[in-house]
Amino acid sequence: MIRPPARPAPAGTVYFSLLGPLTAVRDGRPLPLGPRKQRLVLATLLARPNTPVPVDVLTDAVWPDDPPRTARKNLQVYVSAARALLGSDSRDGRDRVVHGCGGYRLTIDEGELDTLRFRSLARAGRAAGERGDLRTAARLLREALDLWEGPPLNDLRDSTGVAEEAERLEARCLTVYEDWAETEIELGRAAVAVDGLRDLVERHPLRERLRVAWMNSLHQSGRQAEALAVYDDYRQLLARELGLEPSPAMASLYRAMLGRGRTARPAAAGREAAHGTALPAAPRDFTGRREELRELLALLGSPDERVVVVSGPTGSGKSALALRAAHLLGDGFPDGRFHVQVRREDGSARTPAEVLCELGRLCGVRVPGGSGVPAESAVTAASAVTAASAVPTDSAVPADATVPAVSQGAADAWQRWLSLHRALIVLDDVPDEAFVRGLLPRSGPSSVVLTARGQLAGLAPVHRIALGALADGEALELLAKLIGPGRLRTDPAAALRIVRACGALPLAVGVGGMRLAVLRHLPLAEYADRLGDPSAALDELVAGDISVRLRMASGWQDLSADDRRALGRLAGPAQEGGFTLDGAMEALGCGERAAIRTVESLIDAGAVTSPAGEVTAHAALYEVPRLLCLYAREREEG
């Protein structure tokens, strides 16, 4: 097997490394990279090679708290230094760093940057493994890992922006290490992986796939007692931290080890999971939601639950909860975990066909009419249609359900893939039921998590988890993560006023915390007073390009015209501690039946919350999140 091609770098070319401390070498000699801020800019550009990097991203990496007025000019100086270091492109003589509408773009080849070489070797190694050439796979994956010299960018991780890029690179390295270890185990050479796996498990104790590989390597090396102890330690850790049990697959492996001798365990399923995982980074500031997380993990670990809806008002943390669960599930879904954002950046919904095409690319299923994937990893349209009649339809989705704008051939190909694989799909920010009906599994072991503002009542039977505001303690914990516990302790009463003025919604508390982290001179009491002013609160909840008002506007546009008018009229009484049915009748100027229909329509849309227990319509106290009330009043008065 020939190594993946790399265009040889000409003499005098600088070679950069991110998989460890940031370094640069020319002709075997290390190069000075300048002061820290200059290195932060260079690291951020190199972490996103051949891709425009917005100026705001560079600014946040260098000055996360309080950028000076001269930030843009200073960035230009640092970028000029990077240009001088890189030199011109040997192919056309142009600058290697150029500025365009999307930001600064650094052009660099595989032979000049270790992360690009790492990616190429890992891809080639996985391809060899999929062909059954395990020896070549192990060699190529080991070559990739030999480029890994420690935690990526470990000398610059005090910058939040660089730390996020470094964590993404480290996650990629961990996945390749798991690929390599499983391949060596399958080849019967487990002993070479034992020590490295132990070190990585100590640094990443909740990563189940690492634990499984360590168990297998110890067992194959004749160290059965140690292998069983790895499982027991993990079981106790999960129970203590999350109140959970190890996955059924890991538990099954443990039971098998109790009763068998020294054998190798096939690792193909683990490699497929790593190859198929496509999740954004886990939310760094995830706080609270312990019961909801425990419930979601339990549901997704059950073979009987195919679809879970996580609903709640704008800013309640639905996406964060779904992603947190997806990252924790690990080998529970051996065919991959995938996340697809259903909306565009402006809040408008993508078409179902666009979403299905992206799912096809991520999962390796050829979707008729889409961009397609290589034939060796795809389920072709012909085979999918041929097998369509064999796909059972005894689930929540009717057999004849179709998604508007999705062809029957594409839907059949997708359903065929779902019927044959155990994967987790997160469809984020779903607008309505009709959008996703044809995307949900009719049969098979795959699961789907839908996040939506509304309840998606037209989907049944599915399990629903409704999110509301955080408890005061959880909201304060989130605020402390952003501004520091010491600052929060200077005025805990004001901190409590802040989180309550934010409606204890994670989005608003997070934005308020980010704003306070920048405005370090601002007393908490003064900021609490600003948020307490109904006419100014939404103006105060802006941090950089994140605006609570804009997020509220996106949710507002999802409501029907009738619901928007009704919410505008109900915002007044809702601000005063909620409203009853009688209050709704008075505000809407209608009779009881019309008021009930209107309030229940708003509950279904996620704009109004109702008591969790059973209570008559007249006795119920209905609520609207405070910030949504403020936005609705703005629209009503405007």
Image (tube, grey):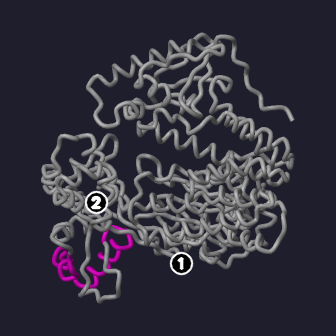
| Residue at x 80% of width, y 61% of height | 222
**Residue 46 in the image, given as x and y percentages of width and height:** 54, 28
Report whether 42 appears left or right of 304. left
Amino acid type shown at disc 1: Ala
Asked if residue 598 is among those painted magenta in the image, a careful observer would answer yes
Residue closer to the observer: 17 or 463:
17
Report whether 523 appears left or right of 156. left
Q: Is residue 556 visible?
A: no
Residue closer to the observer: 579 or 15:
15
Neighbour class for label 1 at 10 Å: few (<14), some, many (≥20)? few
- Tell me which segment is drawn in magenta: 579-608
How many marks overall?
2
Amino acid type shown at disc 2: Leu
- For label 2, the SS is helix
**Quadrant housing residue 591:** bottom left
- For label 1, the SS is loop
| Residue at x 31% of width, y 77% of height | 610
Neighbour class for label 2 at 10 Å: few (<14), some, many (≥20)? many
Compared with 381, 12 (above or below) is: above
**Residue 33 in the image, given as x and y percentages of width and height:** 49, 19
Report whether 523 appears left or right of 169. left
Q: Which residue is mark 2?
A: 476
Q: Is residue 120 visible?
A: yes
Asked if residue 606 is among those painted magenta in the image, a careful observer would answer yes
Label 2 or label 1, whichever lies nearer to me, is 2
Give me the disc on residue 460. 1
Compared with 202, 460 (above or below) is: below
